[in-house]
Amino acid sequence: QVQLVESGGGLVQAGGSLRLSCAASTLTFSAYAMGWFRQAPGKEHDFVAAINWSGGSTTYADSVKGRFTISRDNAKNTVYLQMNSLKPEDTAAYYCAARRTTGVPGKNSEYHYWGQGTQVTVSS
C-alpha cells in the first residue's frame, strides 16, 4: 500500500506560480511512475502530467505544456508539479497518483494509488 499526500495548493492570481508536492510513503518510490491529475467541479479527472521512475521521461497534457513542469526526487520520495503562468481555467483540485511500472501512464485508470488532493484556485 502506498499513501500519497499532496501539499502546496492555494489561491493565486492569474499569471502567478505555485509548486505542488506529493510525498509518498513507500520504501520503493523509485519503482513507481507518478502522475498529476486535476478535477474541476462537475468534471472528470483530467490528466496533467506524468513522470517515469527515474525522471528521465515525462509527458504533459497539451493544455499545460510549456507552463507546468513535473519532476521528482527519489531520495525524498517526492514528486513535484511546478505551475507557472497560471490561468483561471487551471482552477481545480489537483491529485497525485502512483503506479508501479517502468512506463509513463497517461490515463487515470492506469494508476493504482491516489492522494486526497490539494485545491488550486486561480483568480482573474
Image (cartoon, rainbow, N blue to C red):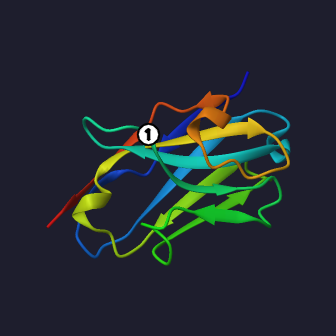
Does dot 1 land on a helix, a strand or a loop? loop
Residue 86: give x, y in percent of width and height.
Answer: 32, 69
On the image, numbered disc 1 is attached to which residue? 45
Residue 45: give x, y in percent of width and height.
Answer: 43, 39
Please say whether residue 12 is visible from this viewpoint.
no
Does 92 sit left or right of 46 as displayed?
A: left
Please say whether residue 17 is visible from this viewpoint.
yes
Please state, as top left, top right, bottom left or bottom right, where the N terminus lies in the image.
top right
Where is 89 relative to 120, above or below?
below
Residue 94, quarter of the rendered image: top left
Q: Is 114 or 105 nearer to us in this picture?
A: 105
Given the image, on which type of amino acid does mark 1 rest?
His
Q: Residue at x 53, y 60 (%)?
A: 81
Q: Residue at x 43, y 52 (%)?
A: 8
Residue 54, quarter of the rendered image: bottom right
Please state, as top left, top right, bottom left or bottom right, where the C terminus lies in the image.
bottom left
Q: Residue at x 27, y 68 (%)?
A: 87
